[in-house]
Amino acid sequence: MSGIAEQVRAELFALQDLGYKEFHCRLMPTVDPDTVIGVRTPDIRKLARELNKTPERAAAYMADLPHRYYDENNLHGALIALMPAYEPAVAALETFLPYVDNWATCDLISPKAFRKHPEPLPEQARRWMASGHAYTVRFGIGVLLGFYLDCAFQPEYLAWVAQVKGGEYYVDMMAAWYFATALAKQYGAAVPYIEEGRLGLRTHNKAIQKAVESRRITEEQKNYLRSLKRKA
């Protein structure tokens, strides 16, 4: 463990909130509570901004993998999110994503560099979805969910997500979230995937459940989607 990583760990423990730790651990059944310090996300992001002011220190911290604590991984993800340039952000993700072992860290990472829809990003997301590592796959789906369901949407992205091998709970839930949002934003393109049963059973039914909770879908559409639920 480097001196920088040791210093940062001490800063994280100084921000510890044990009540928050207890609450948050209940939301992450796959994470060992002994690896959770209990730092709130706004404090993680504030510390990342402070650390980012000295790039050499931030780089040294990010090079110190694997991290021991969940919160250290969250800080690492928050530092990647601050990267303004596309290629360094992707390189940092390629190094870091194999160490991500839970949905919360995975979903925290929303790189600034992705917001302008760089041309190579959709294909990069597709490669992540084919990785075989559950949280890398989840992250790739999340990229298409977060950045490519509005003006940059392309119908083939729906097929990419539908083709993801299902069965892992946190992958299926992200795919369901993606299709529920697609039904709200791109209904005409997305609904055939539900009508034709092109998703796994769990993803199919969860996508319908989430979609009918949306205010962006009409009552007529909701009733139709309910009629498309499948039985095990």
Image: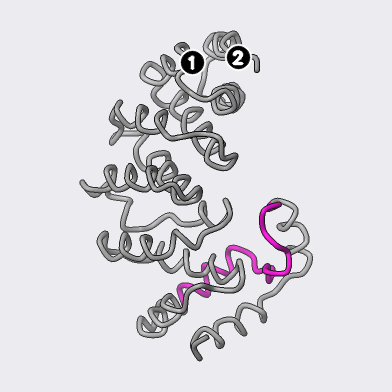
Most distant residue in the left direction:
119
Residue type indicated by callout 1? Gly
Location of residue 119 in the rendering, given as x and y in whole percent from the top left corner: 21, 46
As measured in the structure, the alpha-carbon distance from the residue carrying label 1 to the one carrying label 2 is 8 Å
Residue neighbourhood size for the residue with mark 1, other residues' Cα within 10 Å, grouped as few (<14), some (14–19), many (≥20): some
Query: Does residue 75 belong to the magenta stretch?
Result: no
Contact check, label 1 and label 2, Cβ < 8 Å: yes
Which residue is found at the position 59% from the left and 27% from the top? 202
- Bounds of the magenta segment: 28-50
Seen from the viewer's position, the closer of residues 31 and 38 is 31
**Is 186 situated left or right of 13 in this image?**
left
Location of residue 49 in the rendering, given as x and y in whole percent from the top left corner: 45, 73
Name which quarter of the figure residue 168 lies in. top right
Q: Please tell me which of labels 1 and 2 falls first in the chain.
A: 1
Residue neighbourhood size for the residue with mark 2, other residues' Cα within 10 Å, grouped as few (<14), some (14–19), many (≥20): few
Seen from the viewer's position, the closer of residues 164 and 148 is 164
Which residue is found at the position 56% from the left and 57% from the top? 101
Which residue is found at the position 54% from the left and 35% from the top? 172
Location of residue 84 in the rendering, given as x and y in whole percent from the top left corner: 30, 64
User: Which residue is disc 1 drawn over?
Assistant: 197
Residue 10 higher or lower than 205, as above or below: below
**Is 226 situated left or right of 117 in this image?**
right
**Is 109 situated left or right of 212 in this image?**
left
Seen from the viewer's position, the closer of residues 193 and 45 is 193
Residue type indicated by callout 2? Arg
Query: Does residue 42 belong to the magenta stretch?
Result: yes
User: Which residue is disc 2 drawn over?
Assistant: 230
